[in-house]
Amino acid sequence: MEIQILGSGTCVPSDRRGSSGYLIILESTKILFDCGNGVTWKLEKSGINYLDIDHIFITHMHPDHNADLIPFLFATKYPAEKPRTKELNLWGPPGFKDFIKSMQNIYGNWLNPDNTKISELENHDYSFDEFNFSAIRTGHTENSLAFRLESKGKSVVYSGDTDYFDEFIDFARDCDVLIIECSLPDRLKRKGHLTPADVIKIASSVKPKILALTHMYPICDSENIYEQVDNETDCKVILGEDFLSINF
């Protein structure tokens, strides 16, 4: 399994980090976790044809996690060369179908490509040909979700945007890779987001093999949050960067 971090930042502009997007590459399936602004062209820069994406899973309705659905769907509707032939599966939390319909009401048929299926996720398990998937509510917003994907004995958990909550520990426990938001330094803690102290607490219970810190506001780059987490955890800690690949 390979993970490519396409956006390790937030809604705040940064020349180092773009909005959320994570590409999961399996043997014959390509999956996006979130599709924040800039993700579509970053796929191209990474050498991935956007028409090869099979599933897009959206954690919640904030623009830095879904705004690039607009250019992605537009490009899928009108590709320059060969049209998309396989089904595109869009997944989101409750209310996602109305969200997509609202975008289509604004842009009309431009955002209505053929062979596209739109579904809403609930708190239960899903089984696909090459992977199993589950979601859990995080409380960041009314309908925000965290994801867990398992394939051939490997597992990756993506926290999405969240604050600390006990149920997440069991959901993420013993995963191979935990992609976890670490939005702000401890001194700037905000409700609904994690800081290094929160991440350390989670990692000590979940015990992932690899802990990837992401969704960082620009101030994090001057506060060395990597060392704060790395010094207090036993797992391998990775500071998320745009275009960084994790193979495991």
Image: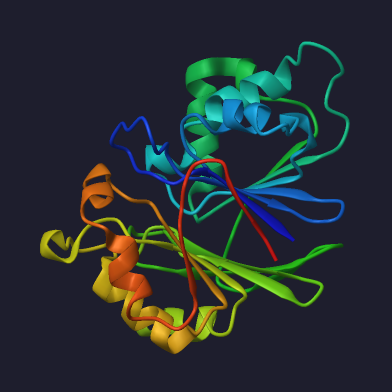
Q: Residue at x 71, y 24 (%)?
A: 76
User: Front-most of 161 and 104?
Assistant: 161
* Quadrant position of the N terminus in the picture: bottom right
The answer to whether residue 200 is left or right of residue 52 is left
- State whether residue 248 is above or below residue 234: above
- State whether residue 58 is above or below residue 76: below
Q: How many marks?
A: 0
What percent of the width, then of the height, locates residue 144?
42, 59
What percent of the width, then of the height, locates residue 73?
64, 26
- State whether residue 230 is above or below residue 47: below
User: Does the image show residue 165?
Assistant: no
Q: Residue at x 16, y 63 (%)?
A: 189
The answer to whether residue 186 is left or right of residue 172 is left
Q: Residue at x 46, y 31 (%)?
A: 37
State how the image is colored: rainbow
- State whether residue 136 is above or below residue 96: below
Q: Quadrant of residue 14?
A: top left
What percent of the width, then of the height, locates residue 228?
28, 70
* Quadrant position of the C terminus in the picture: bottom right
User: Does the image show residue 107?
Assistant: yes
Work out which residue is located at the far top of the displayed protein and give it. Answer: 80
What percent of the width, then of the height, locates residue 93?
51, 55
The answer to whether residue 228 is left or right of residue 168 is left
The answer to whether residue 77 is left or right of residue 87 is left
Q: Residue at x 84, y 20 (%)?
A: 83
